[in-house]
Structures are given as structure tokens and as C-alpha cells.
Image: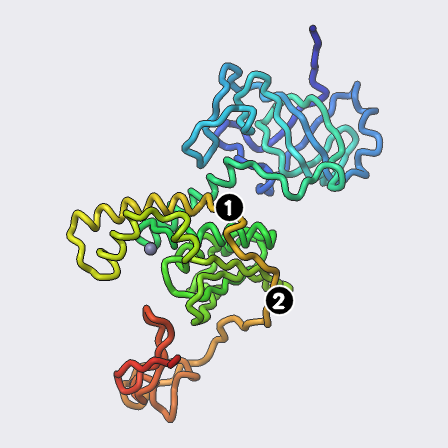
Amino acid sequence: MSFEVSPIGVIRSPYKKNGEVPHQGRFSEEISEIEIFPEFEEGLKDIETCSHLIVLYWLDRAKRDTLKAIPPHDRREHGVFATRSPNRPNPIGFAVVKLLERNGRFLKVKWLDALDNTPVLDIKPYSSKIDSVEDAKIGWFEGERMRELLLKAKEFHGHICPFVALGVRMSVLAMDELGVSRNETATVGEDILAIVECNNCLTDGVQVATGCTLGNNSLIYLDLGKNALTLVRRRDWKGVRVYVDAEKIRERYFDREALELFEKVIVQRKGDEEDLKKISILWENIGWKMLELPREEFKIEIVEVDPIERAPIFENVKCKKCGENAMATRIKDGLCLKCSGGYYAVVGRGIVRFQNGKMEEVVK
Ligand SMILES: [Zn+2]
Ligand SMILES: [Zn+2]
């Protein structure tokens, strides 16, 4: 068997060296130009009617002698055919690009992630009806994304435990179900809101994984004491609520040793340093296991939520007693709530009220 492939054109891109190429051209706004050689120009007829194209190109600077790849942001090796690594036996690159403009035999496109002077092999129209498979997944990539988030959560939360991991797992389920990505400020992504129903480790997992935090006003806390997360799009207030039965999970996935040690160390506070070390290891192991919990372990429902306002900005008013400024809505008869004696707080057990320095339970 023998065959020959020769380039039909060449890519002019802003990327001159390997390190400059984005891992996914799809998330880049850079513009590249594809020059089609004159003898192939006729083949471009009607291409300007296509909004998106599939471009195949020859990664001429790639290594061809490897069958394993460690993708960016990954720590594990995968077979090259399960990755999009440029280094592979036949280094054919592929990208779905947006066609911005055709000028004779020159095509202006974005989302291309090829080095400058890369030879082009072929171009085909992309069709969202034919080529898009909505529920397509790369298993190792999904897992990697969650592991990455759990490591981030460890930094934020202080340790890896089953519930911080559940927070990550539930967030990813909710984000996928809702078709949204992490709330990153200053990006063009969808504006999302997370509503949690508890203030335990799970809530930290949610904040890290969804990017919805108390400080950026996209975390709402309902004092319900349930392990549940509702993720909502602000655009239409449609959301997904994910609930997990912690008792069931404990029975099915926690080993007896971990549970007994937890009872001794955390609940009764009777463990020594050795126990503490041991439980943190056991706990972390269960945490990693939580990321793999099958979808069936969760109750997932589509919900509609009443709009919740963003943090309104109020002027500051000086308290007559302590002289400190407080938000106007938190001044009563000229006094800040601290000086007037009554205010609410979120503590470990939930929302409580402080009256003249004494904590009162709100829910009795
Ligand atoms: Zn924790
Ligand atoms: Zn005061």
C-alpha cells in the first residue's frame, strides 16, 4: 500500500514557537490565515457560505516516535490515540475553526492552534447537525478535571475529605447538566449562582469547583442542613439541584476503620496524634474515591428559582456609639447592629442570632 499526500496550502499564524501555541485553539481569539495554493483555488468555491470549517494540517515539527502522551495539566500518561497530542506516528493536526472572511485564496479564521508555516492537508465544512455529539465524553479528561479541582479545593479548604470531594463531584455534575462552566470573573462565560443548603466541607468544594463564592456574591446559603447544591443560570433562573444522601454514601463507600476512627477523633475528640494522622489519610483516600461516584448515587433535578438580587450598594452611615461606618441598612436608630445589640451570624450549626452578645438559636 502506498499513497501520497501533498499540501494544498499553508497556515500563517501568530504562533512562531511550540510554547506559544494554545492547548485548545477553541478558547483563543487569535486570528490565523490559511493560504490555499493557486492550483487548488477552484476547490474553495462556496466556502464563504460555511460558517465553520474542519482544517486538517501536517504538524511538521512534531515527534513521530512516541505512542504515549502526558497531556497539559495532566500527570498521567495516556496512549497518543486517546489524546490530541501533536506528537504521534502520523502528526496530522485537526481543528474546528470559525471562518471570518474569504479573500480569494486566503481564509481568515479563528480557533486554529497551528504553528506559523504549517502545511494544510485538507479543509471540510463543519456541521453542528452532523458533527456535534452533545453527550460525547473523554473519560480520562473528565476525571482529570475533577482531580485538578480537588487539589485546588485542598489548598482552599486545608485538607481533602469526603465532603469537600463530594462538593467538587456535585458541582461538576451540576455544571455539566446545566451546560455551564466555572464562574471565572472577567471571562465571557455564563453567569452562574450556587445555592448550598449546608455550611460544611461540601460548601468549600462547591466554591472552588464552581467559582461561585461568598465574596463574589454568587454563593447563596440556605440554612437547611442538607447536602445539596443548586446551580442556577442568572440569564433565565433555570437550574439543576443535586442532592446526595450522605448516610447511604457512608454505608456504601466508607470503610469501617475510617468510620470508627472518625467517631473517636472528630466526634468525641479523643484521638491522639497518631489517630489524627491516620484518619486524615483514610479520609483523603475516601475523598478521591468520591470523585468516581456514579451519577446514580445523586438525585438530580431541573429546577426554576426565583431571581435573587446581587449585592446592592448602600451608602455608609456612622454609628453614633462606636463611631464606625456601617452599611446604611445595618444602622438602626443611629446605631450599628453591634451597638444596638441584635444581629445574625453564620456559625457551625447554621444561622443564629446574637442578642446582647448571647447566641440564640433562630430555628428552635
Ligand atoms: Zn473537610
Ligand atoms: Zn456601633
Distance between the alpha carbons at the discs numbered 2 and 1 = 25 Å
Q: Nearer the viewer, residue 165 or 63?
A: 165
| Numbered circle sitting on residue 23 | none
Mark 2: which amino acid? Answer: Glu
Q: From the viewer's perspective, is 162 left or right of 220?
A: left
Indicate the quadrant where residue 336 lies: bottom left
First in sequence, mark 2 or 1: give its number: 1
Q: In the displayed image of the protein, which residue is found farthest to the left?
A: 272
Number of residues whose C-alpha sits closer than 10 Å to that of mark 1, classed few (under 14), some (14–19) or many (20 or more): few
Indicate the quadrant where residue 198 lies: bottom left
Residue 258 appears in the figure: yes
141 is higher (above) or lower (below) than 204: above
Q: Nearer the viewer, residue 363 or 359?
A: 363
149 is higher (above) or lower (below) than 314: above
Look at the numbered disc 2 and give the secondary structure of its residue. Answer: strand
Beta carbon at label 1 within 8 Å of ligand 1: no
Q: From the viewer's perspective, is 112 left or right of 211?
A: right
- Residue at 50% of width from left, 27% of height from top? 18
> Which residue has dot 2 on it?
304
Q: From the viewer's perspective, is 317 left or right of 219?
A: left
Q: Quadrant of the N terminus?
A: top right
Q: In the displayed image of the protein, which residue is found farthest to the bottom?
A: 333
> Which residue has dot 1 on it?
294
Indicate the quadrant where residue 135 lies: top right
Residue 325 appears in the figure: no
Q: Quadrant of the C terminus?
A: bottom left
Look at the numbered disc 1 and give the secondary structure of its residue. Answer: loop
